[in-house]
Amino acid sequence: MTPLSVTPLMDHIGKNLIADNIMEAMRAAGYRITENDPFEEKAAIIFSEREHSPHVNRIRMNWAEMRDVVLENFPQVLLPRQDTEAYLKQVDDIFVTDAYHSLSIEGYRVSEELIERVRSGNWDPETNRKDKEYANVLAARGYWQAFQAMKKSLTKVLNKNAAGIVAKQDHAIWYTELFAPSVSAGIITASDLAGYRNQPVYIQKSMHVPPRHEAVRDLMPAFFTLLEDEKEPAARAVLGHFFFVYIHPYIDGNGRMGRFLMNVMLADGGYPWTVIPLETRNDYMATLEEAGVRRNIEPFSRFLAELVQKS
């Protein structure tokens, strides 16, 4: 690990979350960080927010227009809210099913047996490096690690911490864990996981083209502000999932991250953990496409509402 002394400039001017994100990204890239603040006094002026991309006003307007449609189509909470321990046990019990369907939706070829093996620690990717199952094993292990990180965030939310703030502070940790096994295997570098994407992305078989990477640094803070300010958990769950994958802030893993985010928001509202089954993939993608291309959120709202009711 490379030692590095840094000047905490963002902390000094009051941008603490940005400072924390930079420090975590540098640690993820393999640096051992020590802080050295040469400033004797705090900044005398208040730094305003930077000018926003036009995309920001667009998602704000779309959120405002879509939320009422979501609430018209989403059920009220069906069951009394459970205590934290009981809810977390149910989430643990559903992990294998959740991982199987979420990874399969993304095209990984996994089985419940493989996921159980990875969860139990009975895996050795080095022995399977040349095996066609290698990428699937790494994805399954990454999902397990991300799931554990997400559960810590879920515990905070169930203990009455604001769900939007928790997601803003913790989502980068979920993402790092999602691809940590690939870093260990030498397939990608730790620095690849630092921050949001810095290049274009395209979604296979979709007419929606995610915003340019230059806009992402404006869109994600705006997205989390909308998530924090939204009072209705159902709107946070549906619109949180939709706008996260609409922005597509990462090169890979956006669908899995969006489903984690959705379920953390559902839990905050007393809804059950909800798995999107592989057999509904076509409907899932079609309703997201309808929302992304035509700004029609009703089919996606109904799609998720039906799954929540079945859960």
Image (spheres, rainbow, N blue to C red):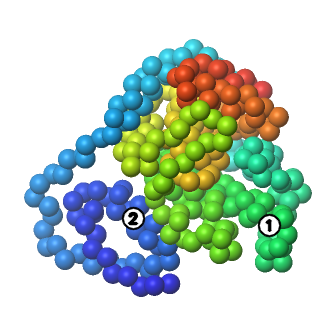
Q: Residue furthest top?
A: 72
- Given residues 84 and 288, the one toward you in this image is 288
Which element is circle 1 on? helix
Q: Is residue 285 above or below residue 294?
A: below
Picture layout, residue 239 above or below residue 47: above
192 with respect to 64 (left or right) = right
Left or right: residue 243 versus residue 283 is: left
Q: Amino acid at mark 2?
A: Ile
Amino acid bearing label 1: Tyr
Is residue 272 in view? no
Q: Quadrant of residue 86?
A: top right
* Above/below status of 70 relative to 219: above
* Quadrant (top left, top right, bottom left, bottom right) of the C terminus: top right
**Which one is in front, 168 or 52?**
52
Judging depth in this view, the residue of 79 and 12 nearest the camera is: 12
Residue occupied by mark 2: 22
Q: Secondary structure at mark 2?
A: helix
Q: Which residue is mark 1?
A: 134
Q: Is residue 72 at all visible to an observer of this figure?
A: yes
Determine whether, in the image, residue 291 is placed left or right of residue 25.
right
Residue 303 % position (x, y): 69, 24
In primary-sequence order, the first of circles 2 and 1 is: 2
Residue 184: name its quadrant: bottom right
**Disc 2, disc 1: CB below 8 Å?**
no
- Residue sitting at x 85%, y 69%: 131
